[in-house]
Image (spheres, rainbow, N blue to C red):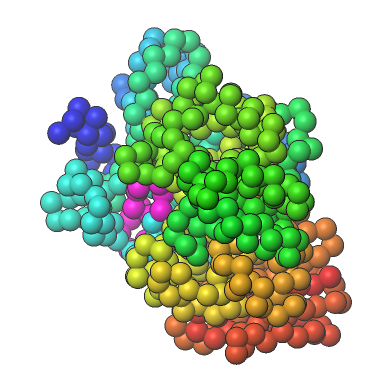
Amino acid sequence: MSRKIILLLALVALPMSVWSQTKVQTAVTSPDRHLSVSVQDDGVTVSCNGKQALQLAQVGLEGNNAAPDFVFSQKEKTRYTMLSGKRSNCVNEYNEYRWPMGEGQSMVLRVYNNGVAFRYEFTDLKGLFPQEKTAYRIPEGTRRWMMQWGDGSEGLFPETTSYKTPAGSSFSGVWKTPEGWNTRWGYPALLQPQDDVFVLISEANIERQQSASCLFNKGELYRVVPDDNPSKVVGKWHTPWRVAIVGSLADVVESTLITDVSEPCQLQDTRWIQPGVVSWVYWAYNHGSNDYNIIRQYVDLAVALKLPYVLIDAEWDTMKDGYTIEDAVRYANQQGVKPMIWYNSSVGWVDGAPTPKYRLNKPEDREKEFAWCEEIGVAGVKIDFFSGENLRNMDFCLDLLESAARHHLLVNFHGATVPRGWQRTWPNLLSTEGVYGAEWYNNVGTFTTQAACHNATLPFTRNVIGPMDYTPCAFSDSQHPHITTHAHELALTVLFESGLQHLADRPESFLAQPAEVKQFLSELPAAWDETRFVSGYPGKSVVLARRSGKTWYVAGINGTDEPQTLLLPMPFVKGKQITLFADGEPWDISTLGQKPASIQCKPRGGFILVIR
């Protein structure tokens, strides 16, 4: 057993004293006073409208046993804009409190109207990171949707009420109990501590000299454990923000808390950053893009559907029949379609993995490669196969984003961990995979029956925290069939937010759809001015309304195997010209004279309303 594994196991072996209920010393509140944080001897409790929502059984650092004692620091309300995401204009409002912990250490707590964020700050580190004691208590019986940790964050969020979840077959014995229960969990984690209160736990604002963290549990106690970080910091340093979004399902889904606490945009000129829909070759063939003639088909699809981008996937460096990547890029640009190309990060899966490899790892190679991309007319890069959340991966991602921005390249991280706010700091990052998405129809047959429920869970979990490259909307089948309806698949293009929305299906399938569907895809936004939760419950159903300019897109899906009526309470949506895409054989497309109050969906069905 490695020293790293022994250390992580030691971190989760917490004393029983952490579990004790202790006397409340003081309380702090959000600006609207709906949230309050009660400070205790061992930790803090977050309450929503007087109801306990989340218990941090312990906060602070190892070696500091003083009870938390927060002092008001400041009240802040600022605004910022996002080039992509669920909302273009965001408000960052909070009350900030500080707990001086002695010897140049402090904990900073920000209480928002819809959540809390906290981190530990240091003014005089000596090269060693104090161990963090942060631990959430999730009592047995609490309904939760949590993903078992993986270095690519590609897992399901099954509904359960216990920590006793069998560990996945790929997990080594060190990440599970002798009974076989999983003990390592990725972000985000959704909890329902009260009937009308939900909590989403995650983190945000990973900076240089920081690793990301995950959760390790011992029974009901879930400890925040940073990944490997060999940095030797002298002087000032702080942890990433630990974040908990708290409130109703609407508060969770609509929250921008992850970007609220992240560093502002680092770019002076962002006019070249344009979100958009992408034609994508991989799904249909379970293979890369070394066939020039197939690439041409996807460029031509983008032309036919008026899509701004095409992705040339892996293996373009081994193009067949005498063609080169320059030929493919030139053809796309000549047709008015902006090409993006794929790279292997060469820090994760390397042996046996597709090429090109080792072109981005050294600074001088990376600059040369990205300068070449800019010169030949490449608009962006998809970088794949990272190896987790340690310092090496986090710093490498930041290196890639900074270098790509210098050369006006959009970025899509694949095989990577979930977003933690970089989409605000580096807005050229338009999407991240970090999701169990439609690619899994190529990998396992089990996704066929799991997809509808999983799709109806993601808007409440993974997609809350940032863009999600699920690669939605397949009307035909890949290696394994799908049993969701056509309207369900189309609805995913609105339900799933991604600044680069890759359409999964093959050209002939898209081009065979009714004219109204093709027009919908031609006009589909990839960034939203406003997002509203309408109705639903994780895994059962979801209806969201997203606005682009003066047009509302209302999308809903049924996550169950039974017919279901989805309710549409949305007085905020205005418009008279209404088009409905609903379940049919395979379509029911109609023009409506007024907004419907509900829509009937088939098993695993869905719908879209376009309201102008």
In the image, residue 599 sits, relative to residue 385, either above or below, namely below
The spot of residue 28 in percent (x, y) is 56, 39
Answer whether residue 145 is magenta in the image. Answer: yes
- In the rendering, at what x and y percent does residue 414 appear? 49, 46
Residue at the spot 40% in from the left edge and 71% down from the top edge: 480
Residue 411 percent across, percent down from the top left = 60, 40
Query: How many circles with numbers are drawn on the protein?
Result: 0
> Residue reaching furthest right?
576
Whether residue 90 can be seen here = no
Q: Residue at x 63, y 34 (%)?
A: 373
- The residue nearer to you, when weighing 277 against 103, is 277
Above or below — where is 430 with respect to 280?
above
Give the residue at x 84% y 70%.
612
Q: Is residue 215 above or below residue 438?
A: above
Left or right relative to 296: residue 520: right
65 or 9: nearer the eye?
9
Q: Position of residue 590 (x, y in %)?
A: 75, 85
In the rendered image, is residue 602 in sight? yes
* Dominant SS type (magenta): loop
Stretch in magenta: 138-154
The question of residue 11 being in magenta is answered with: no
Q: Residue furthest bottom?
A: 585
Farthest residue, direction front: 322
Classify the position of the N terminus by image quarter: top left
* Residue in the picture at 51% in, 68% down: 456
The picture quadrant where one finds residue 31 is top right
Determine which quarter of the picture holds residue 302: bottom right
